Each structure stands twice: as C-alpha cells, then as structure tokens.
Image (tube, coloured by chain):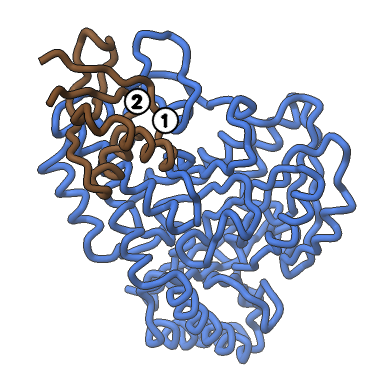
Amino acid sequence: MIYFDNAATSWPKPPGVKEAMIRFMDEIGANPGRSGHQLSIEAARILYKAREILSKLFNVKDPSRIIFTLNATESINLALKGLLRPGDHVLTSSMEHNSVMRPLRDLEKRGVELSLVPCSSKGELDPEDMRKRIQPNTKIIVLNHASNVTGTLLPIREVGKIARNHQILLLIDAAQTAGAYPIDMENDEIDLLAFTGHKSLYGPQGTGGLVIGENVNIQDLTPLKQGGTGSRSEFEEQPDFLPDRYESGTPNAVGIAGLLAGVQSVLKRGVSQIHQGEIALIEELVRGLEEIPSVKIYGPQKGRERMATLSFNIAPLSPSDVASRLENEFGILGRPGLHCAPSAHRTLGTFPEGTVRLSLGCFNTREEVHHAIEAIHHLSKGNR
Amino acid sequence: MPYAVILFPSTHYAIRAEKKARENGFSVKLIPVPRHLSSDCGVCLRFSCDQKETLECLLQQEGVKIEGIHLLET
C-alpha cells in the first residue's frame, strides 16, 4: 500500500509519537493545571514543553502565546470570530479551504464585509491585487500559506509587509506548511498563525493551535469558549491572561504528548531538509505525469516554490474513478473531489468535478513515486 | 532559613518559573498552593527566602507573570 494522502493526515507517524502517548496514559494520565499533585504537575509539564518546542519551531518569544486547539479549523474560527465585528472588512484569496471560507461566509451574514481576491488558474496570488482591495475598515487579511489542492505557496511575506504598512492583522492558515516549510512569525510578519498537529508536525489528530502574535491585543480577541481553566477558580468570569483565556476545559493532553514527540522528530530531521526531500519527490512525480498526454496537472508554474501536493485529472475519466482504480488496482491511496475547497477548484477551473490529489510526506520514497507514475500511465492508456 | 512561595496566575507560568529557576541554579519546588493563601486549585513555587530578590528579577526577565509572593509559616 502506498499512502499519498498526507495533506489530509500524515501517516505513518515517526517513531516516538505513539510511545509518548502510551507513556502519558500509563505513567501520567492526570489533568494538567487542575491540582497540585505530582501527576497533574507532570501533565502540565508536557503542555509546557510542547508550547516551548512550538515556539522554537515558529520563532515565538513567549510560549504562552501558543494556544492549543483541536485543529487549524478551530484556530481559524477563534481568530476570525474573536476579532471581526459587524462593520469590519476582511480580505482573503480565492484559493482558501472551507476552514476559512465557511467562518467568513457566516460572519458575512452578521455584517462583516468580505472581499475575495482572485488568484490565477494556477492558484497564484499577486500581492498587488490584495493591496488594491484594502479599505479603511480592513481589519484582517487571512490567507492559506499553501493550497491543500495544488501545493501552491502564497506570497505571505509580501502580503505581510502590505498588512503591516496598513496596520492590518495577517492571519495565516498553515495547515499545509507547519513542519514542512520554514515559518518565522517575526520575519514573515505574521500576526496570527493557525496550525494543525496531525499533518506535517506528525502528531495525532485532535491537536493544533493558534499562535497569537505580539501585535494582537488579546482584549480585542474574544474567546470562542469559556469555562474551567484551573486558575482564578474563585471568579465566574473568564481569566484575561494567556494561555488560559483561550483554553477552557480539559485539554487533549495525551494528544499533545504525541504532538510534542512529533515536533521533536521534525526538528531533529530539520524543516528545510524535510521540505527539500519532499520537493525532490513531487518534482519527480510532476515530470513523470507531464509526459502522459491525457494527464492534466493543476498548480504552480515550473520552478516556483511549492509543497508536495499535486492535483491532476486523466481525460476523460472522473476523479473518483481514477482514485478508486488507483487504490483497487495499484494500492495507491489519494483523494478525489473538491478537497473541502470549492473556491480553490473554481479558481483552477475544476469545479464541480474536482481533481485527483496525491500528497506526499517525509516517509514516502522514490520507488512509490515511480509506481504511481506507472499506474497513472496505465490508467491513461486504457482510455485513448 | 524560612521559605516563601510564589503564586502565579496560570500553571503555565508555574512550570516556566520552575524550569527557568532550576536552569539558573535556584533550589525550588512546585507544591500545592496552601489553602490559606488561595482557594485556587493549582501549584506554587517554594523557594528559600534569601533568594527572593534574585529569583523575582530572573522571573521578570523571563516574562513570568507573578500573582504574589508569600512567606510560609513553618
């Protein structure tokens, strides 16, 4: 079996992740920050270490600005719904995932003004198109760092500079990049970074977070939920300090123990090294597929930086037929359809049928890529 | 030497304080918050009174938020 669905969830996980979770269940198990006994303290240490290593990964000075959530979707919801009020204006690209589009469409019904900046049919964004649409009431620019459909990277540094100049907050959806592409909160001028733990950070599902940059006034960022935090228990009002203001209820501590081990493994391998390894594979896959006449590849121009995710179709087959034949005849697991990103597929011209997506991780090999090229070649021949 | 404890708004800061203090050679221990100091359910950092100024200074540098410092009656 060849697993090419890492953009949805990475698999397998590196050695140490499962073991860290088992160790937590066997030896710690208690509720972090809820009591003074040694197991509770040990659980709190796991959360602390995870915040600290994530701070290192994203170049964040203060680990308390890392807020744990279930996934990037929850983080994006927290940032958008916590900051935007009726009358505010928000800018985004036409390449966004529904994790951004759906909260924005909901906010739009509640009086938030939304502008969608069109991207090219390769999913690329011209920062100038973003700048032109800035209004006096623009509060946030929200962008995916890389497309979950095509692996196209958006120019977040250029947009970040524009945002800073206009005192607009930049929220980055790093679901497809955190761990597989270098991210620097300070140098990239990111104000809010939404990440997930179960993709390129190689943690388990149900882990993720929001990094709240120093430019964000937390009194202006309303929590998504209120509840027990283990702190200020005598008061019925939510604490106003980090990270407790945004972390009510018992956290997924066992998951965060796994995430900690995943990020340790990523840092040990090196983010740039992981990126280069994955890019070598995806470029080989692109070259192989380009030689097949009935295959159409969607995504970034040649030579552009990208992520190891690729979308294609084989005319005249439907994406779902291709994906099920890849699995049934060749044991290759990809993902057909719209990938929760209808706006991105409209931009690419592949709505509503979608594409077949193959997404690689750091454990994939050249042999697997060659096998996939042969398989796709075989499928294309039967239809000429 | 009498002991004192530092109370923190969040367990996050208690763990950070313990780590930074130990890295800098302080002898500290996380203990449950004594009932008479707070009704809260968390932990506080116990240290030796003669280190109050230097420890407080270090924690401030490390961005640790402190709720209060209390002498412990032994």
Residue A19 spot, x, y in % from top left: 18, 56
Residue identified by numbered label 2: B8
Residue at x-position 75% and y-position 27%: A109
Q: Secondary structure at mark 2?
A: loop
Disc 1 to disc 2: CB gap under 8 Å: yes
> In this image, A166 relative to B64: left or right?
right
Q: Nearer the viewer, residue A250 or A234?
A: A234
Residue A88 spot, x, y in % from top left: 79, 31
Quadrant the N terminus of chain A occupies? bottom left
Residue identified by numbered label 1: B65
Q: Secondary structure at mark 1?
A: loop
Residue A362 spot, x, y in % from top left: 39, 73
Residue A123 spot, x, y in % from top left: 72, 65
Write down the quadrant of residue A366 in the picture.
bottom left
Q: Dot 2: within a 10 Å radius of its alpha carbon, few (fewer than 14), some, or many (20 or more) residues?
A: many
Residue at x-position 60% and y-position 73%: A306
Which chain corresponds to the colour blue? A
What is the chain identity of the residue bearing mark 1? B
> Could you tell me if residue A138 is visible in this image?
yes
Write down the quadrant of residue A309 in the picture.
bottom right
Identify the residue at the far bottom of this view: A291
Q: CA distance from mark 1 to mark 2?
A: 6 Å
Which numbered disc covers residue A166?
none
Write down the quadrant of residue A154 in the picture.
bottom right
| Mark before the other along the chain sequence, 1 or 2 | 2
Which chain corresponds to the colour brown? B
Identify the amino acid type marked 2. Answer: Phe
Quadrant the C terminus of chain A occupies? bottom right
Residue at x-position 52% and y-position 44%: A211
Q: Nearer the viewer, residue A292 or B5?
A: B5
